[in-house]
Amino acid sequence: MAAFVVPVFHHGGRFLRAANGELSYADGIVKKYDEIDIDFVNKEDMLDNVKDLGYLEHKDLYWHDPTTTYFEAGLHLIRGDMDINNMCDFTLNHNLKEFYIYIEHVVNVPIPPEDNGDVGAD
């Protein structure tokens, strides 16, 4: 019997540590995808979803265990399909209908244009 799950991506925000030391994900957007067969979830599809959200690059992906008391304790780095399998097993074992992915974005620093002497020219 197939089990279906809804991938839920948190993106566009950033991880912040409060003065009390607690980590959170702030200013993000939540995107729920259509349900998928959990037996076919893989890292390549996760990366396709990241691209679908408009990101050509990212720093890291994390799945989150929503049963933890503290947000940070529930974060698990996704390095490969073994981590995806752990997320799927956890989801099935806890009768969850969604899994939660957080995107940590690359901080890109813009490169200033070269000074070619044309600035301010008419």
Image (cartoon, rainbow, N blue to C red):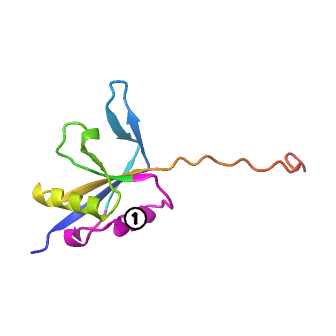
21 part of magenta stretch: no
With respect to residue 112, does 22 lie above or below? Answer: above
The one nearer the camera, 38 or 43, is 43
The one nearer the camera, 52 or 45, is 45
Q: Is residue 97 left or right of residue 76?
A: left
* Residue at screen point 22% across, 48% down: 65
Q: Position of residue 45 (x, y in %)?
A: 35, 69
* Residue at screen point 48% across, 61% down: 54
Q: Position of residue 29 (x, y in %)?
A: 38, 50
The three-letter code of the residue at mark 1 reads Leu
For disc 1, the marked residue is 47
Residue 67: quarter of image: top left
Q: Position of residue 5 (x, y in %)?
A: 20, 64
Q: Is residue 102 left or right of residue 37?
A: right
**Which residue range is magenta in the image?**
33-60
Residue at disc 1, secondary structure:
helix
The one nearer the camera, 42 or 50, is 42
* Residue at screen point 13% across, 73% down: 2
With respect to residue 38, does 21 lie above or below? Answer: above
Q: Position of residue 99 (x, y in %)?
A: 24, 57
Q: Quadrant of the N terminus?
A: bottom left
Q: Is residue 60 left or right of residue 7?
A: right
Total of numbered circles in the picture? 1
* Residue at screen point 29% across, 39% down: 72
With respect to residue 66, does 50 lie above or below? Answer: below
Q: Residue furthest bottom?
A: 1
Q: Is residue 65 left or right of residue 104?
A: left
